[in-house]
Image: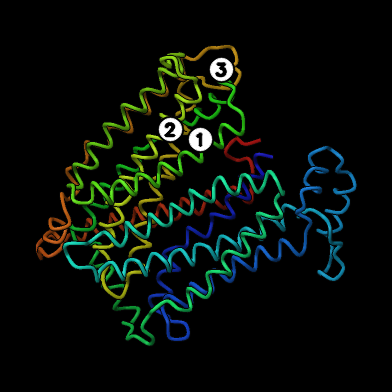
Amino acid sequence: SEAQQATISSLKSLPSTFKLVFGFISDNFPMMGYRRKSYMLLGWFVTSLSMLALLFFSDLSKEAMERNNSGDIEDYADQRVQFANAKDLSTTSFGTPPTIAFLSFSLLLFGTGFWLADVMGDSIVAEKAKLEPEFSRGHLQSTCYACRFFGLMIAAPCSTVIYSTYGPKAVVVLMAALPASIVPLIYGLKETKNVPVASTKEQCAEIYQTVCSRAVWQPMGFVYLYNVLQVGNAAWKQFLKTVLGFTSNQLNALLIAAYVLLWLGIMAYKKFFINWSWRSVYVTTTLLNGIFSALQILLIKGITFGLSPFIFALGDDAFADFIGGIQFLPTTIMMVHLCPSGSEGASYAMFTTMSNSAYTLASAFSTLLLGVWDVSKEVMERGELTGMVNLTALTTCIQVSGVLFVGLLPRTKDDLSNLHADPMSGSKIGGFIFLFVTFSSVLYSLVVGVLNIIKPGWAGES
């Protein structure tokens, strides 16, 4: 059910709430002499192990899936009960689909390992990026993220084809094998062993001093406000399915195109915009995004200039993701410049957590806006689309309004460095607000995740 899907999704993403904890532990407590490599190995080992357990203790074959979907599930239901009530693995009857509880636990472990490894990867990039010559600052990060999104772009269509052709078992096999294949590369990663580590008290004091700097709370304030205002039209997918009749394959094609354009946006920034003023990048891309977002109103009204609705929607959504790719790198480059040496894990995780939590809040706002006008499926089926037009116009205006705060953003890396070096730019109030917003956002994400787990359907899912 939709509620069960929300529960499983929440369990998988719940460990992302603890990115700050993962970063703090790696900064303060080296494992086997290493602050990053050992934890990264542990993270990928856990992801691989969780998928291997799912493979070994359940039936994920395409035939099992087809029997399940065909409605011939009475025997399978009995087997699930047997699996759930088994007192130990030796008495479990294998060849059964995973129970919701077992699937959820496996994905929770997978998410824990993934986010642990992800934080270590970000920390390494942050450390290495600081070693770049001044004239090439940002190129390492842009290259790393280009590789990352290229992988995502390739994985999206491949996983769709593999799932459709061979079933979920093949996908899970890859999810178990790929993390394991990274281990030799991590082993060969160059990291200085047994580096001096400042005390936990000293690192906390340094991080607090950092966030009190105007060079931190002012630009991060912009990032938070801008991301909070990226409120989407939560009824858009329902409109594509109900009114335009988009199939699952067409919706998947939109998703794949989004990943491709996101990668192209990253590459475009690296190639053409890396020397632009950060303010210029945000002003230009925000206004362009507003124009293309407003074009959705034409699609709602059926004005597509002779193009099929799918091609029109593809171009509109794809360009929005292309712009998102361009906007992504300036923020991450800025965050690296703000990290104090020796505390890159906790500080970078804190900055990204604040940024990502703003998107979570924006998603919550978009859900609330569904109650302003009636944009239910039943209304769309009757052809009443005034609410959709109004909601699209409102969300477009909210998104574009983020440009009003661009004055909080430094123009260039040099401006950021000068602001950081100014001894009079500190503010304990600014630092307190920054930390309050960060930890409140973490708490909010944690509460939402826990509610999705212990009370499925609380947000209105069926």
Residue lying at 35% horizontally and 23% vertically, measured from the top left: 294
Marks 3/2: CA–CA distance: 21 Å
- Relative to 276, residue 317 above or below: above
Q: Which residue is mark 3?
A: 380
Disc 2 marks a residue whose amino acid type is Asp
- Relative to 387, residue 344 above or below: below
Marks 2/1: CA–CA distance: 7 Å
Residue 253 in picture, x, y percent from top left: 54, 36
Residue in the foreground of this view, choosing between 208 and 2: 2
Disc 1 marks a residue whose amino acid type is Leu
Disc 3 marks a residue whose amino acid type is Met
Task: Please tell me whether mark 3 sits on a helix, a strand or a loop.
Answer: helix
Residue 241 in picture, x, y percent from top left: 58, 25
Q: Are marks 2 and 1 in contact (CB under 8 Å)?
A: yes
Q: Which residue is mark 2?
A: 317
Task: Please tell me whether mark 2 sits on a helix, a strand or a loop.
Answer: helix
Q: Which residue is mark 1?
A: 254
Q: Quadrant of the C terminus?
A: top right
